[in-house]
Image: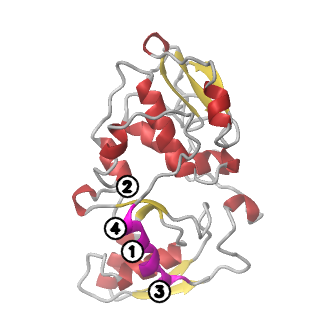
Amino acid sequence: MKYVIEAAADADIELWILDRPNPLGGDYVVGWILKEAYESFVGMYPIPVAHGLTLGELALMAIGEGWLDTDHHPKLKVIPIEGWQRSMKWNETGLEWIPPSPNLPTFAHAYAYIGTCFIEGTTLSEGRGTPDPFLTLGGISTDFGIDTTGILSAWNSSGLNLDIVTFTPESIPGKAFNPKGLGELHTGIHITNPLELEDPLSVGLRLLQWLMEHSEQARYKDYLYLLAGTDDIDQLKEQDFSPAIQNVSIDWGLPLNQFVEKRKSYLLY
């Protein structure tokens, strides 16, 4: 969308955006704010991981805040959504789910993805090559040990339901040609109630902490910073996490509060 707006502006063409709902809802706004040093194709604007904006609202904010690379002022018209309320998640709209990625076959997968995608920035498996990517997470069994005593009940008390599973990533045409850990037995967890989570981003990051603690050989990759849009995620990398902690939520700091105030000028609903 950023590139289309810029190209249309440079060509002096009016752009129409047929607005659509934010799948996670319009009120779920959490995460670190992207820093300029970590701008990439997976993060282009100084916004949080979950920004709560529709495409039209995001376009208006990008224009209003001067985030676009163009010398011409874009001509933009947003065709609004009918019947949508900010509190609605995708499964409450009655609309068909069309996978934006082969590894996000249902909205439940996408809802968990906002947090569990960070495991892509490690050597652990995010479940590609299994029927439930981003719901099935773990590491190679010979290097991964989970003491199940009390673990599941501790996580369940925080609202997350987990099963301990073993899985072997396979090559799946059109979905996962060469997934991490291909053909190797993994031990890990499967999230059984993703749509019941109030804060899937924080839960996914806490699971990342916990899973990394149970692997001696698992490593973080530099790609993790592009996914987070910041090196502030180092604060979590350096902390130990116990699932016995009841509150998995993370304090995102003043920059998130400033973004929430700034975005109010661009809300259409």
Q: Which residue is mark 1?
A: 258
Q: Which residue is mark 2?
A: 42
The mark total stands at 4
Residue 144: x %, y % from top left: 46, 17
Pick the front one: 253 or 216: 253
Helix, strand or loop at mark 1: helix
Q: Return the mark for residue 265.
A: 3
Residue stretch rendered in magenta on the structure: 253-267
The Cα atoms of the two marked residues, 3 and 2, are separated by 25 Å
Q: Amino acid at mark 3?
A: Ser
**For the residues bearing labels 4 and 2, Cβ distance under 8 angstroms:** no
Pick the front one: 220 or 41: 220
Which quarter of the picture shows residue 245? top right
Residue 153: x %, y % from top left: 67, 29
User: Residue at coordinates 62% horizontally, 18% vertically from top-left?
Assistant: 149
User: Residue at coordinates 32% horizontally, 50% vertically from top-left?
Assistant: 226
Q: Amino acid at mark 4?
A: Pro
Q: Which residue is mark 4?
A: 46
Q: Amino acid at mark 1?
A: Gln
Which quarter of the picture shows residue 1? bottom left
Q: Mark 3 or mark 2, which has the lower sequence index?
A: 2
Disc 1 versus disc 2: nearer the observer: 1
